[in-house]
Amino acid sequence: MEWVERIQSVLKDPLQFVRDLKAENDQRVIGIFLPDVPEELIDASGAFPVTLLGGEKAAGGIGSIPSFACSLITHSFWQATLSELDFLDGLVIPHLCDSSRAFFHIWQRNFPAQFSDLLRLPKKLNSQGTKSYLVGELRRFKEGLEKAFGVNISNEGLWKSIDLYNENRRYLKTIQTRRSQNFHSMSNYDFFSLVKSSMLMPKGEHNQILRKVLAHGESFPVNPRSTPPVRVFLSGKLVEPLEIFRWMDEVGFLVAGDDLAVGSRYFSYEIEDEGDALSALAQSYLQRIPNALVEGPEDRLSFMLKKVREDGLQGVIFVHLKFCEPLIFDYPDLKKGLDREGIPNLFIETELHSCAAGQIKTRLQAFAEMLGSKE
Amino acid sequence: MKEASAPIQSLSMLKEINSQYYEEIRHAHELGKKIVYVNVFSPAELFYAMDIIPVYPENHSVFLQARKMTEEVTRYSEAEGYLRDICSYALCDIGSIYSGISPVGGLPKPDLLYTSNCQCGTMTKWFEVLSRHYNVPLFLLDVPQPGNKGFDPNAFEYVKKQMEELVTFLEGITRKSLDRDRLKRVLQVSGETCGYWKDILDSAAQVPAPLTVFDQFIAMAPIVSQRGLPVALDFYRKLRSEIEERVRSKIGAVPGERYRLYWDNLPIWRELRWLSELLASFGACLAATIYTLPWTSLGVDPANPLEGWANQYLVYFDWHLERRVKLILELKERYRLNGFIYHLNRSCKMLSLAAHEIKKAVAEATGIPGLVFDADHGDPRFYSLDQIRHHLEIYFEMLSHLESSR
């Protein structure tokens, strides 16, 4: 599989991939943080938005950021102090949690010359002022990009970017649905490699890859399993290291639904043609799947229960990034809600590129066996 | 050990003020009043004007922590699945709810909840837990603070709109319209009280300082929870007179005051006495802190309160890195500070994440080194008194060398 190799080479060293890309295309690169930064606006400005998801080289980093920030933040800071991120022309951080906001100001102080933006997405979706605020905030962000880089982002240009991103989201969603219906179609590891790589690669090339994946049709030889898998819902923000998906494959899980930022929250919506592109971007934000950081129309438990029931899932696995406070606060009530409904669930805590592999494998194995024996 | 200064007499009023407050909230419904749980930076005056008594889970946790009950109550929240990595206020409060353990007989069940993320994001998540537990509505005031990008009219309109929605929400709950004249009167009392608080804090600029930051920590409960009520006004008026008298008589809070320090972040509630005695033994007086400062400026224009609050939450409470550095440098001049202590508070990511950067910036600007040390505002499992003492010994030795070399 040619595409598998391409994706794996990107995932092996994403920063090098972006560095090479920048040298080849002479294109500006803007780093973004999870979740929900409207990449379409950055794309329409002619720059390439790349999601910062840590990296192995951060491990030896220096820099004085407290150890009780999540590893997504400490890794990015250490990478920056090691000049690993010096290819960036700017950084955009959505202010959703306290740590990301503090990190933004630390970044700004250390790299004052660079373009940087604290994007303040609304956390309350039921105020009458929410949408108009959000449109205004997106406009401010757009004008900031235009001013910093001397470009003009037209409504037409923005729609072109939206179409490109919509295509990518649609493909990922189709693949997700297909694998949920046919467990031969693709392993967890390959699927989430596709999702993660979408955040690291230009959408044009990624769409080409996804078209090839889809052209393979129903039976995809990457996941030659003979027994039906144990179908589960995955909850959290991101699952790192990605090897965790391999372990899930090995013990027979199929992740058939999720609420991850590096998962369904990234691709399970499409931006509908409304004329004004900023208004359309805003509208899509108001209708996404629940997120621990936004007080949305649907709570996380209802969403989880609906998925589990509608798709006939057998259990829920929580994968939390250590020190992510919003997730910790939600977990006990989510667990109670699942327990009440008799839905088995498992809790795993990880840090980027450092987790207790043996222990996690054992617990996944035991959970799979428990669910398997319930059949 | 140097001889301790005469204690501040007015502080002894607090016990009675507090027990009255808790007595009143226990009987709120009999008095025809509702109970709202709120975060500390909330429009207390609006609630009081609508016969809704604001109750502060944060303050309740301070009691639990100061009375050394953290380990006892957090066993219960941890058993419910809450990890120690969240704010210890929340961990204690939730543990107290599940165990019923409380030094003040627990908090009465709320009728509604209000919180704002102008303070931190933790409050929202904590209050969502409370909202599910008590099955009562939660009003979130979403405040998108712009950082150092300057005033943002779009964000201001959004917050103002929500303040209007808050009033409608409260009117729905109480089935009464807001009496704007009554609100005005409460705001006048509140403004005056904040003025007293400001005078009290300003007096620490005197040499020797008549009170320390520890005294401020102890004295702050009424300005948080009873701001706008005559009882708070009366207390701070008396406290201010006594402090003025101390200034006139040149009574310093720390005998032989040698160091005048800035304290960053929250107190370590459980160790107030230990730490104040330890610092006094070095001749060190904590003269200023960011933590008690906000209440000097909480007054809003009684003629235009909703806009006043929107502006306050959006602009005044936006304590980003650059602004904190600027504040500390101002405080250094105003209070004649010669040392800076930064409590790296594991519970408060909001105030702690940039501590090292702030320390670096202040040291560069003043030529005076700062001390960052690890602790927690309420969970003793995350610090060691021996280590803190050790850090302080080294720090004062360093300051002493610096002093003699100048």
Image (tube, coloured by chain):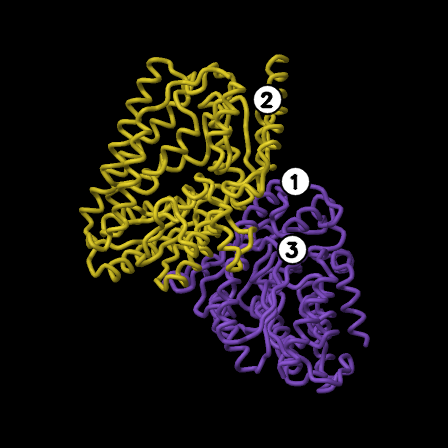
Chain colours: A purple, B yellow
Would residue A102 be found to the left or right of residue B124 on screen?
right
Kindly indicate whether the residue at mark 3 contacts the one at mark 1 (C-beta within 8 angstroms): no
Q: Which residue is mark 2?
A: B396
Q: Nearer the viewer, residue A93 or A42?
A: A93
Kindly indicate whether the residue at mark 1 contacts the one at mark 2 (C-beta within 8 angstroms): no
- From this view, report whether residue A196 is shown above or below residue A67: below
| Amino acid type at image mark 3 | Ile
Indicate the chain on which mark 3 is placed.
A
Q: Report if residue B60 is visible in the image.
A: yes
Which of the 4 image quarters holds residue A218? Answer: bottom right
Question: Which residue is most to the bottom?
Answer: A218
Q: Which residue is mark 3?
A: A30
| Amino acid type at image mark 2 | Phe
Q: Report if residue B364 is visible in the image.
A: no
Picture quarter with the C terminus of chain B: top right
- From this view, report whether residue B281 is shown above or below residue B157: above
User: Disc 2 versus disc 1: distance between alpha carbons?
Assistant: 22 Å
User: Disc 1 versus disc 3: distance between alpha carbons?
Assistant: 24 Å
Counting from the top left corner in percent of width and height, residue A174 is at: 63, 80
> What secondary structure is marked by label 2?
helix
Indicate which disc residue A64 carries. Answer: 1
Q: Earlier in the sequence, mark 1 or mark 3?
A: 3
> What secondary structure is marked by label 3?
strand
Counting from the top left corner in percent of width and height, residue A178 is at: 65, 83
Mark 3 against mark 2, which lies toward the viewer? Answer: 2
Q: Are marks 1 and 3 on the same chain?
A: yes
> What secondary structure is marked by label 1?
loop
Counting from the top left corner in percent of width and height, residue B46 is at: 27, 49
Q: Nearer the viewer, residue A291 or A276?
A: A291
